[in-house]
Image: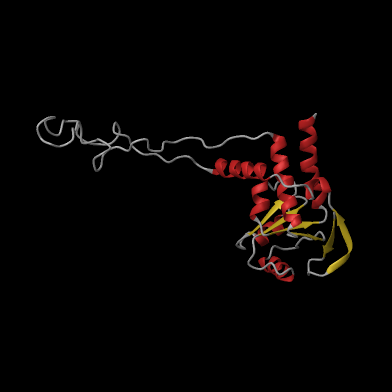
Amino acid sequence: MKLDIYKIDGSKSSKKAELSDTIFAIEPNDVVLYEDVRRHMANKRQGTHSTKGRSEVVGSTKKLYRQKGTGNARRGSAKSPLLRKGGTTFGPKPRDYSFKLNKKVIQLARKSALSVKAAAEAITIVNDFTFDTPKTKQVLDMLAAFELTGKKVLIVTPETDKSIYVSARNIPGVSVLEGNKPNSYQILHADVIVIQESAISVLENSIESNTEEVAA
C-alpha cells in the first residue's frame, strides 16, 4: 500500500510512503478488536467501589416486633436489606477487573485497527517535523492545514519529542504517542492518525517483532 507524503503546511510532497500490506491491509477481525478494546477499558477501571452489607451497616440487631400475630412480614433486624437504611444485597465490592490476552491476539487487534483506519482513508503521512520551542499554535496551524480542527487526532512520532508533546497537550482530542506505543483502542478512538514518515518503520517493527517473538 502506498500513500502520499504531505508537508506540515498541508501541501503534497513528491514522495510516497510504502506501508506493509500485512499490517495496514488485512481483513479486520472484529471479535479480536472487541476483546482487546474491552481489555484496555477493563484494565483502566479502579475497582474501588464498595457497598455495605447487613453485617456492616450501623443499626440495631434487636428484633423489631414479635414474629407472629401482627400481620406484617417477619423482621429480624433493622439492618435487613428490605428496609430503608438497611444493608445492600449482593452489592459491589472492591475487585480487580483486569484480564490478559495472548500477545498474538493483541498484535492482530492492532493490525485490524490500523487496517480499519487505512480502509477509511483516516491515515495521513507527513514529513518528519519538530519545533524549536513548544507552541500550541504550531500544532493548531498544522491541524488547520489538514482540515482536522476539532477532530480527535493521534500524532505518531518515531521517538519521544517533548516539543511536539507539550505543544499538543492542551488541544482537546489531540494526543501524541511514539510509534511503538499505540494500542487498538487509541487507534480506533482517533478520527485521523497523523504519522511522521520515519515513525512508519517504528510502528511496523513494533508489531512484526512482537509477532515473531511469540512465534519463536
Q: Work out which residue is located at the far left of the displayed protein and give it.
A: 69
Q: In this view, does 182 lie to the left or right of 75?
A: right
| Residue 171 drawn at (x, y percent) | 62, 63
Q: x and y percent of residue 111 in the render? A: 74, 46
Quadrant of the snapshot with the C terminus: top right
Q: Residue at x 69, y 39 (%)?
A: 106
Residue found 10% across the figure and 35% down from its top: 70
Viewer-closest of 114 and 176: 114
In the figure, 17 relative to 89: above or below? below
Question: Where's residue 25, x and y in %?
Answer: 79, 50
Q: Which residue lies furthest to the right in this view?
A: 14
> 163 left or right of 57?
right
The quarter of the picture where residue 66 lies is top left
Rendered view: 126 above or below 97: below
Q: Is residue 160 in view from this perspective?
A: no
Question: Where residue 34 sits in the image (x, y, percent)?
Answer: 62, 44
